[in-house]
């Protein structure tokens, strides 16, 4: 760290997001504005100097010599995280690492890897790993009028309410291509602000041509599915279980195989409406 | 010595009730288990002092339905497989799961015991992976089937 500390740092920022404090420093002027859109949603500047994780972005400066590539390097504390000639690639690595670290280190909130939309005052979550089609389903729901909460994390507080993590949607046209970022507003949808109680959790996998015929899942089985997508369950098992218990109190779990997202999204919203109607009766 | 032969639930696990089911988190193995109502009720009665027929009688009283000993044996078999019981010094002879199921009456008044388990994810497993040709630091970051080669997922 001392070697890094000795470099001339042109720009610095200390931020706080979901109770996690992180710092970013860059050795070149004019780079920090490119970092700001990549920070976790809802971040705030922090006056504190001591941070849990410090990112040092060493931007390659000066002329390139023949036969030598100058690389930009990103460190998290003292550990190199990314090294590349393309600055946007290194910035993307900063975003991924910072979001992951925030989800892992936040102690006031439990992060579940899931897509989330708001619908009629309740949250609908789709837990799942990468490439399970969360973003595709979320995008379809937004098209049908749902409010955007996240395509990455369901953030659960100690009362069991789901908070937004409304970063721009990372849409992959194909799993082998990088994501293109779209804000919910650009897709014609609104982003949620208010924390919501969980209405429904949908555990689904994609299979080309499959018909969406979900089965109900018990509360315990549903909670186990959420546990399987909890980022910090190994380091914070007590809090995770307690928050899951509060989260699922009044929710319904369905599980099934979906085909195209359009059909499944409409069916899920209809199911959610039917449930609301049953509850009011 | 006799007491050791009776099933005893592990106390070093976290457990939370979800309706009549129980979610158990094994802190030693980082495994989550969902016990359905019958498995949960059996697990709670594993105090190290009750034998399977006694557990069956207590369950029958609690559930107001006749619970056969074979149901308890089936639950104990699954709980032991999930490492949710203290391991006895002398292995307990229990009928195999197939035999236990065969013994259970065709019409059961209660749900058959069921223990479902998952391995808790590491933070990297539970977060988004890095797609093809993007920067990575190790193999664990890359989306399957890609590997981190020269700091790129390929």
Image (cartoon, helix red, strand yellow):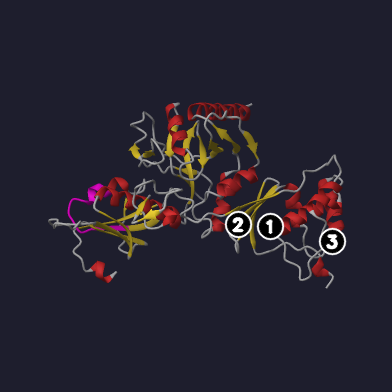
At x 36%, y 30%, the residue is: A187
Task: Please give the residue where the numbered disc 2 appears in the rendered image.
Answer: B31
Pointer 3 local density, CA inside 10 Å: few below 14, some 14–19, many at least 20: some
**For residue A271, which quarter of the picture?**
top right
* A26 inside magenta stretch: yes
Q: Position of residue A145 (x, y in %)?
A: 44, 27
Give the alpha-carbon distance from disc 1 to disc 2, as whole Å: 9 Å
Q: Which residues are magenta?
A: A23-35
Q: Earlier in the sequence, mark 1 or mark 2?
A: 2
Report the front residue among B94 and A190: B94
Q: Earlier in the sequence, mark 2 or mark 3?
A: 2
* B41 inside magenta stretch: no
Q: What is the chain letter for disc 2?
A: B
At x 29%, y 69%, the residue is: A1
Residue B51 is tagged as 3
Give a yes or no on whether discs 3 and 1 share a subunit: yes
* CB contact under 8 Å: marks 1 and 2: yes
Task: Please give the residue where the numbered disc 1 appears in the rendered image.
Answer: B82
Q: What is the chain letter for disc 3?
A: B
- Secondary structure beneath dot 1 equals loop
* CB contact under 8 Å: marks 3 and 1: no
- Secondary structure beneath dot 2 equals strand
Q: What is the chain letter for disc 1?
A: B
């Amino acid at each position: 760290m001392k070697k890094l500390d000795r470099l001339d740092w042109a720009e610095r920022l200390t931020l706080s997001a979901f109770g996690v404090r992180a710092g970013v420093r860059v050795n070149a002027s004019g780079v920090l504005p490119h970092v700001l859109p990549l920070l976790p949603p809802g971040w705030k500047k922090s006056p504190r100097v001591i941070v849990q994780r410090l990112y040092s972005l060493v931007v390659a400066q000066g002329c390139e010599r023949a036969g030598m590539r100058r690389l930009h390097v990103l460190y998290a504390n003292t550990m190199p995280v990314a090294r590349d000639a393309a600055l946007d690639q290194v910035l993307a690595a900063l975003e991924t690492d910072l979001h992951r670290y925030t989800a892992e280190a936040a102690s006031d909130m439990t992060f579940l890897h899931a897509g989330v939309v708001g619908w009629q005052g309740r949250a609908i979550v789709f837990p799942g790993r990468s490439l399970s089609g969360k973003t595709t389903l979320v995008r379809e729901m937004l098209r049908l009028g749902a409010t955007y909460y996240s395509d990455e994390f369901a953030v659960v507080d100690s009362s069991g309410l789901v908070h937004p993590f409304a970063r721009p949607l990372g849409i992959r046209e194909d799993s082998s291509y990088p994501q293109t970022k779209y804000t919910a507003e650009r897709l014609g949808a609104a982003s949620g602000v208010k924390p919501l109680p969980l209405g429904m959790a949908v555990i689904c996998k994609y299979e080309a041509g499959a018909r969406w015929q979900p089965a109900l899942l018990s509360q315990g089985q549903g909670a186990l599915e959420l546990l399987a997508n909890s980022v910090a369950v190994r380091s914070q098992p007590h809090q995770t279980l307690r928050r899951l218990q509060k989260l699922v109190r009044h929710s319904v779990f369905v599980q099934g195989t979906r085909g195209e997202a359009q059909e499944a999204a409409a069916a899920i919203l209809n199911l959610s409406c039917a449930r609301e109607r049953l509850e009011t009766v | 010595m006799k007491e050791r032969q009776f099933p005893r639930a592990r106390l070093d696990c976290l457990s939370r009730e979800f309706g009549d089911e129980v979610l158990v988190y094994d802190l030693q193995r980082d495994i989550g288990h969902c016990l359905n109502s019958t498995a949960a009720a059996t697990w709670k009665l594993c105090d190290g002092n009750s034998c399977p027929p006694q557990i069956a009688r207590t369950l029958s009283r609690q559930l107001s339905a006749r619970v056969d000993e074979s149901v308890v044996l089936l639950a104990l078999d699954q709980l032991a497989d999930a490492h949710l019981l203290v391991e006895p010094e002398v292995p307990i002879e229990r009928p195999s799961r197939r035999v236990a199921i065969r013994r259970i009456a065709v019409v059961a008044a209660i749900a058959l015991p069921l223990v479902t388990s998952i391995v808790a994810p590491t933070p990297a497993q539970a977060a988004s992976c890095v797609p093809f040709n993007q920067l990575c630091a190790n193999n664990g970051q890359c989306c399957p089937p890609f590997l981190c080669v020269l700091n790129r997922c390929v």
